[in-house]
Image (tube, helix red, strand yellow):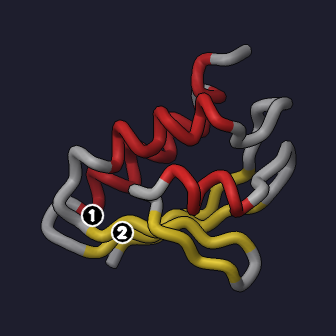
């Protein structure tokens, strides 16, 4: 299992567009991928799960992946967050 904590830094938070990008990227991995906010854990391959997390600017999220390509999965998601989903 690979985990990393990130902070949402794009001003609009994780709304529909970033959620769709996350799902597009996570579907390419065989690992199970989750995102956690506080005690809420969602499947990062589910757009509705991501949206219902309500991750606004400054929210701390934990990215968790478990499977054969878990490290690449976490690294890819972290890069998306670091690039602010290319919105800014």
Q: Residue at x 82, y 31 (%)?
A: 12
Frontmost residue, 54 versus 88: 54
Q: Quadrant of the C terminus?
A: top right
Say whether residue 35 is left or right of residue 40: left
Q: Quadrant of the N terminus?
A: bottom left
In the figure, residue 67 lies in which quadrant? Answer: bottom left
Question: Which disc number belongs to residue 65?
Answer: 2
Q: Residue at x 70, y 60 (%)?
A: 52
Query: Which of disc 2 and disc 1 is earlier in sequence?
Result: 2
Q: Residue at x 71, y 38 (%)?
A: 15
Say whether residue 73 is left or right of residue 53: left
**Residue hosting label 1:** 70
Contact, mark 1 vs mark 2 (Cβ under 8 Å): yes
In the figure, residue 71 lies in which quadrant? Answer: bottom left
Q: Position of residue 24 (x, y in %)?
A: 36, 37
Q: Is residue 56 above or below residue 82?
A: below
In the figure, residue 16 lies in which quadrant? Answer: top right
Q: Secondary structure at mark 2?
A: strand
Inter-mark Cα distance, 1 to 2: 5 Å
Frontmost residue, 82 versus 31: 31
Q: Is residue 50 above or below residue 12?
A: below
Q: Is residue 11 above or below residue 72?
A: above
Question: Which disc number belongs to residue 82?
Answer: none
Q: Residue furthest bottom?
A: 39
Q: Secondary structure at mark 1?
A: helix
């Amino acid at each position: 299992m690979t985990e990393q904590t990130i902070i949402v830094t794009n001003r609009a938070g994780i709304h529909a567009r970033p959620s769709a990008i996350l799902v597009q990227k996570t579907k390419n991995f065989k690992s199970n991928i989750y995102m956690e906010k506080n005690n809420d854990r969602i499947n990062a391959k589910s757009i509705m799960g991501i949206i219902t997390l309500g991750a606004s600017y400054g929210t701390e999220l934990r990215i968790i992946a478990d499977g054969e390509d878990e490290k690449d999965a976490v690294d890819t998601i972290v890069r998306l967050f670091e690039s602010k989903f290319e919105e800014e």
